[in-house]
Image (cartoon, grey):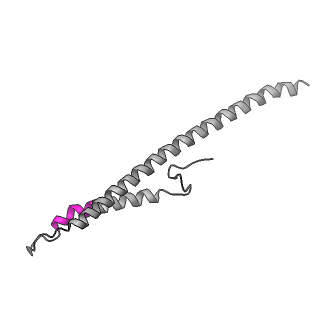
Amino acid sequence: MSVSSCHSDTNPTVNCHDGFVAKSIIYLLESLLLLMPLAFQGGTKMPVSTDEELQARLLKAIYELSARKQKLEDDIRKLDAVNKSLQEMAAVREIETYKNECRLAPKISSR
């Protein structure tokens, strides 16, 4: 059994696309926040409009996505550790089986 580094605890078929989407959304929101002061500047000399409610919502979304990203990364690390442990246990069992077969082989051939 192999556990991919892109799985989650609740859905073993989650793929890496979710992480990419989260990073893309965070990047987009950060870019929007940086560009907002420039929105009405330039040749028209219109006053800079600040929508504090929108900025607050965007910041909240950024923080929530960042927390979700951190949780997903933590879950991936946990699953990788479990996967490594399972692989090590399987390797030990395989070695033990091989040793047992080697011990039995001379006994069978000597009969």
Q: Nearer the viewer, residue 64 or 39?
A: 64
> Which residue ends up furthest to the front in the rendered image?
53
Left/right placement of residue 75 relative to residue 1 reads left
Examine the rendered structure and indicate whether residue 20 appears above or below residue 40. above
Prevalent SS, magenta region: helix
Q: Nearer the viewer, residue 20 or 36?
A: 36
Residue 81 drawn at (x, y percent): 52, 40
Residue 85 drawn at (x, y percent): 58, 38
Q: Nearer the viewer, residue 94 or 70?
A: 70
Image quadrant in which you'd find residue 30: bottom left
Residue at 41% from the left image edge and 58% from the top image edge: 20
Residue at 28% from the left image edge and 63% from the top image edge: 58
Residue at 56% from the left image edge and 39% from the top image edge: 84
Image quadrant in which you'd find residue 63: bottom left
Q: Is residue 34 magenta?
A: yes
Which span of residues is magenta-colored? 30-38
Residue at 43% from the left image edge and 50% from the top image edge: 71
Quarter in which the C terminus is drawn: top right
Residue 35 drawn at (x, y percent): 20, 64
Left/right placement of residue 82 relative to residue 68 reads right
How many numbered dots are placed on residues in this image? Answer: 0
Residue 101 drawn at (x, y percent): 78, 31
> Which residue ends up furthest to the right in the rendered image?
111
Examine the rendered structure and indicate whether residue 71 appears above or below residue 39. above
